[in-house]
Image: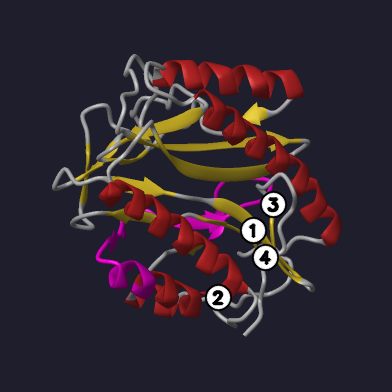
């Protein structure tokens, strides 16, 4: 069941969104050559504790008998697509780093991700990052123009393909509210499953929209740690995410520091 949120509930989620935005702002300041991904995780964990926010990722299990996720951020480097475990890896000039994090504040959740260049990166990697971020921006704008999610997903998929990249299909966005993962599933591409389960873009809907884009094949594989997902061909990957509410006035990004309302002009 899709649970629509009231204006008051969206405002409560906005407070959680500000915390997530500040966490990612902290990562932006710290992520540079010579820093380990464990140091980034520790900084975000201490920040969440300082504001009384509950991290959403730490302790989550991917399935029965699987190890719990041990960190408050996912730190995915280069060919790692998502769910990278922070650790001793030392960031190097030319890396690209995707950081995903979420928290619960006063009972309400927010979730966001960003891909960062570490020092000077290649033109190809910069284009990958720019196209992925632009795909998320496009989706947010189109929330105020389209009637159903499938229309947005098709525009996202076509935009990525026009730039020579591929959309990861094994992982999708999601509804969000009191729980990190709620209905509906929010794919960044159109499939028979989406056509069967398409949903209307109604005021009160809150979505975590998160395109993951690969430079090569869309195929991915799971590594031995049971969490980290990498591209099947070793190509690089980028990931951006925002928690976005649809309101009577249009889409509003909840995981930004300034509460961005999307431009919905023709």
Discs 2/1, front: 1
What is the spatial separation of the Cα atoms under label 2 and label 1, in whole angstroms?
Answer: 15 Å
> Which mark, residue 254?
3
Mark 3: give few (<14), some (14-19) or many (20+) Cα within 10 Å: many
Q: Quadrant of residue 62?
A: top left
Residue 11 is situated, as x and y percent measured from the top left of the image, at: 81, 51
Q: Are marks 2 and 4 in contact (CB under 8 Å)?
A: yes
Residue 42 is situated, as x and y percent measured from the top left of the image, at: 53, 16
Residue 211 visible: no
Residue 142 is situated, as x and y percent measured from the top left of the image, at: 57, 74
The first of marks 3 and 4 along the sequence is 4
Compared across the picture, whether 256 is left or right of 139 comes to right
Q: Nearer the viewer, residue 193 or 110?
A: 110
Residue bearing mark 4: 205
Q: Nearer the viewer, residue 50 or 135?
A: 135
Residue bearing mark 1: 244
What is the spatial separation of the Cα atoms under label 3 and label 1, in whole angstroms?
Answer: 6 Å
Q: Are marks 3 and 1 in contact (CB under 8 Å)?
A: yes
The first of marks 2 and 3 along the sequence is 2
Mark 4: give few (<14), some (14-19) or many (20+) Cα within 10 Å: many
> Which mark, residue 199?
2
Q: Is residue 34 above or below residue 100?
A: above
What is the spatial separation of the Cα atoms under label 2 and label 3, in whole angstroms?
Answer: 21 Å
The residue depicted at 35 percent of the width and 32 percent of the height is: 84
Q: Nearer the viewer, residue 212 or 202?
A: 212
Range of residues picked out in magenta: 158-184
Q: Secondary structure at mark 3?
A: loop
The residue depicted at 49 percent of the width and 21 percent of the height is: 40
Compared across the picture, whether 161 is left or right of 207 comes to left
* Residue 178 magenta-highlighted: yes
């Amino acid at each position: 069941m899709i649970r629509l949120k009231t204006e008051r509930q969206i405002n409560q989620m906005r407070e959680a969104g500000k915390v997530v935005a500040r966490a990612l702002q902290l990562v932006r300041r710290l992520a540079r050559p010579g820093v380990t991904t464990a140091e980034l995780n520790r900084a975000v964990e201490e920040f969440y504790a300082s504001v009384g926010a509950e991290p959403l990722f730490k302790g989550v299990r991917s399935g029965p008998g699987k190890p719990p996720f041990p960190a408050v951020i996912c730190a995915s480097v280069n060919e790692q697509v998502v769910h990278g475990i922070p650790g001793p890896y030392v960031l190097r000039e030319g890396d690209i780093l995707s950081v995903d994090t979420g928290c619960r504040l006063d009972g309400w959740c927010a979730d966001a991700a960003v891909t960062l260049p570490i020092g000077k990166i290649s033109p190809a990697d910069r284009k990958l990052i720019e196209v992925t971020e632009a795909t998320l921006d496009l989706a947010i704008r189109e929330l105020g123009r389209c009637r159903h999610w499938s229309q947005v997903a098709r525009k996202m998929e076509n935009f990525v393909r026009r730039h020579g990249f591929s959309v990861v299909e094994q992982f999708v966005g999601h509804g969000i509210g009191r729980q990190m993962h709620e209905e509906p599933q929010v794919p960044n591409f159109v499939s028979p499953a989406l056509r069967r389960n398409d949903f209307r873009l109604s005021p009160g809907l809150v979505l975590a929209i998160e395109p993951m884009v690969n430079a090569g094949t869309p195929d991915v594989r799971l590594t031995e740690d049971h969490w980290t997902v990498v591209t099947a061909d070793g190509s690089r990957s980028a990931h951006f995410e925002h928690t976005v509410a649809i309101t009577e006035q249009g889409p509003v990004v909840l995981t930004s520091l300034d509460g961005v309302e999307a431009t919905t002009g023709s």
